[in-house]
Structures are given as structure tokens and as C-alpha cells.
Image (cartoon, rainbow, N blue to C red):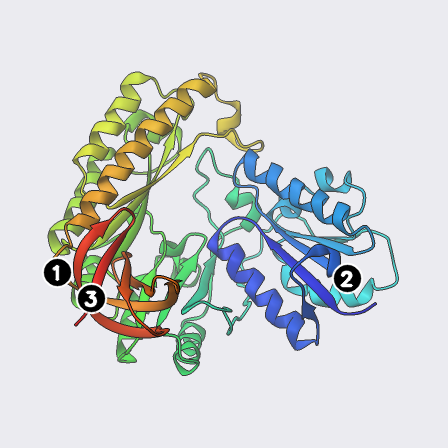
Amino acid sequence: MSNKFKMVTLGCKVNQYETASLQEILTAKNWQQTETAADADVVIINTCIVTQRASYQSRQAIRKAIRENPDAKIAVVGCYPQVFPEELKKIEGINILAGNRDKVNVPDILEKIQNSDDMMIASCDRMEHNTFINMPVKNFLDRTRAFLKIQDGCDSFCSYCIVPYARGPVKSMEQDEVLKSIRTFKDLGYKETVLTGIHLGKYGKDFTGKSELAGLLKAIKKEKPEYRVRLSSLEPVEISDDLIDMVANEPWLCRHFHVPLQSGDKNILKKMNRHYSPDMFKEIIEKIHSKIPEAAIGIDIIAGFPGEDDEAFNNGYSLLEELPVSYMHVFPFSARKGTPAAEFKEQVDPKTIKERAAKLRELAKKKKARFYKSFEGKKLTILTEGWESEEEGLIKGLSGNYLKVLIHSDKLIKNEILEVEILKHKKDYLLAERI
């Protein structure tokens, strides 16, 4: 068996991070990555099951790999084999099933089955352990931002969500390891680190019984960082005054919050097993906006959750109209087998869900355009990411508050922090000039 592999990744940023780790492990073992499955000896599919659609796409990716290269070893890893291994056992052509706990061991497993066509199942039992599995990554290919998974697992059990079953209980990277990883990224030349996790706001809960995210940020502050640190998604109840104050006062912390709302109706939130009210959510968002007016505030919203009648939908829509949010991710409800919500009565018909999602996306466009336009004539700091269009001489960059900014240049500018002045809002970006 030669050593060529192809990676296929579905789903969240944590999955993407873990794929990057597997790529590094295999490369260190002298494997070569290929562009296509047809050229690979092994195809590794890192799966997602967060919705029924995601499960379908994962199965599609598996069957496509088997079809394109019947001679390749097929390794299916991650959330799908963790929760529904029996479904995958029915697909002929899979050689390895490895859940999230054993994802890191796939390179070693591949060596063991080089001369076997039997299916190997690497412990896809329920993840009840509380040990954080570190999958270090140093190279993010062409990215100028480094991602660091510092937390895994979730114990919230929202009624629509399969993630606690796929990822197990909350577990966190030791603080010293986080600081060491950030130092490494700095030494490698990265100018931004994104702290990510399945339930980031519960970082450290497994150490002391309460969130230690603010404490971790204070420890990073002591390092006197010259780089940017960005936080990924945080639950509303985990955004403390202390955390808001830190983002407001520390120039190295990106002024960017992503806060899942999911529904703006109090009764639907209860059915979702979400532990806050619309009024509480509104208070948190307005507090962020009043202390940090230029902060990007993104939200997630689900359209058509079971029991969402016209009144419930309108309650949520009215709340969103009022809130100073910058962008919205809209998800049509998809019944996820294995979750309580899949069995709820009062399922909303697909046509209504589609109409509500479209209405929310129209509102999202207006919110985003208003936020972008508010920066015309202002100064921003961006991290350049290279060419947007070499032909047009446009370099793209990302501001601390998550704005896409383009500047004119006659040469490549990448991984540099630049001060710019915004000239004009153009569709989904800001046009600027260097100061």
C-alpha cells in the first residue's frame, strides 16, 4: 500500500480543525495528500449529522468516494459513526468506522489494516468520558488565521440537537496548553488565533464546575499579546459583564460576538430547552452594543420549530427587527432523528418553513447592509488575506469586527495588519484605501 490520502470534511469549524490535525499527522508519517479520491489510497470522510440534510450529505460523500475509487480504503470518522454506526455498516465499501474519540487514532489504524478488506470499528460507544483529546495543528494551509480547539462536548441537550450524543460531556484543554499553543501560532507568524469549541462558553467547567473563559482571557492578557484573538460562538447566558468589558477594553480581543438566539418566542425557547427569555437575550445584545457600538453581533435563528405558529414567528421577527445585530445565520428546522424535537407534535409544514426562512434572510440582508454602511468614512484595522482578484488588483482583508474589506494594490499583500479608511460599502464588502 502506498501512502496517498484524500480528506473530505463536512460540518463545523471544530471538524475542520480536526481535519487539519489529521492532515498534519499523516504528512508527518510521509503520507501525501491528493486533490481527488481517484488518486488516493485512502479517503477519510470527516462526517456531520447536525441535521438530517448533513447526514444525507455525509452518506453522499461516502458513496461518491467508493464510486470514484473502489480500490481505496474508506475511513468514515466523526459524529456519524459515533452516534449511528449501524446505519453506516450497511454501506458496502467502508473499511474503518471511528467515532470522535478515536478520530485521532485513524493514521495508526490505517497501518494495521493495510492488507485487509474487513471493516474495522474503533469504539463508537457513547462518549461518557471527560478527557479532552488534544489534536494539535500548526499549519492551516493558505489561511492567515490560526484556529485552536480549546473545548469539546456539550451537556445542554437542546431538544433539537444531536451534538451532546456525538461529542459527549464538556471537556477542556488545560490553560497552560492553550497559552503554549497561542505562543506557537505567534512564532509561526499567525496574527490572529480563533478560539473555538463545541460549547466554548463552558470552557473550564470540567475543572472547577463553572466557566473559566474569562479567566483564560485574563491569562492571555498577561502574555501582552501583539496578535488578535477571536472568540467563536457563545451562548447568551455565558456572556458576562466581565467578558463584555474585556472585549471593550482589550485591543487584542476582536470586537465580534456570535450569539445563538434560535427563537425569539419565549414558549418556543422553552420547548427547545434553551434557558433564557427573549427579554434576557435583548438585554445582553443591547448591553454589548451600548458598550461596543462597532462590535459585530451575529446570531443563529431556526425557522419553523415544532409549535411555531404565526404569533410565535412574528414575536421572533419583531425582536430581530429591534436588535442591533450585524448578520444572521438562518436555519430551516430539520427534524433530527434521535432528538426529542423530531417526535414533537405540531410539526410545521415545509412550505411555511421555507417562507419564514426566506423572510428572515431578507431581514438579515438589510441588517448586514446597514452595519457595513455605518463604517463609511471610518478607520479600521484589517488582517490581509491575499488576492481577492489579482486581475483587478484587489486585496481582501478581515477587520477585527468581522467586516470583509478590499483595498487596491499592485502587489500581493498577505498576513499583514494594515490601517485603512473605508471609502464605500459595496454589496457584501467595504472598499477602502491604506492610510
- As helix, strand or loop, the secondary structure at mark 2 comes to loop
Q: Which residue is mark 2?
A: 41
Q: Amino acid at mark 2?
A: Asp
Left or right: 379 in relation to 264: left
- Taking the spot 26% from the left edge, 75% from the top edge, the residue there is 221
Judging by the rendered image, the residue that carries numbered circle 3 is 433
The amino acid on which the numbered mark 3 sits, given as a three-letter code, is Glu
Of mark 3 and mark 2, the one earlier in the sequence is: 2
User: Left or right of 298: which side holds 156?
Assistant: right
When the figure is inspected, residue 178 is found, relative to residue 371, above or below; the finding is below
Q: Are marks 1 and 3 in contact (CB under 8 Å)?
A: no
List the residue tagged with mark 1. 378
202 or 37, which is in the foreground? 37
Which of discs 1 and 2 lies nearer the camera? The answer is: 1
Q: Quadrant of residue 178?
A: bottom left
| Nearest the eye: 72 or 225 | 72
Q: Identify the residue at image location x=86%, y=52%.
A: 118
* 128 displayed left or right of 159: right
Residue density around tag 2, few if under 14, some if 14–19, many if 20 or more, within 10 Å: many
* Quarter location, residue 54: top right
Whole-angstrom CA distance, mark 1 to mark 2, is 52 Å
Q: Is residue 251 visible?
A: no
Q: Eyeballing the image, is 405 above or below 282?
A: below
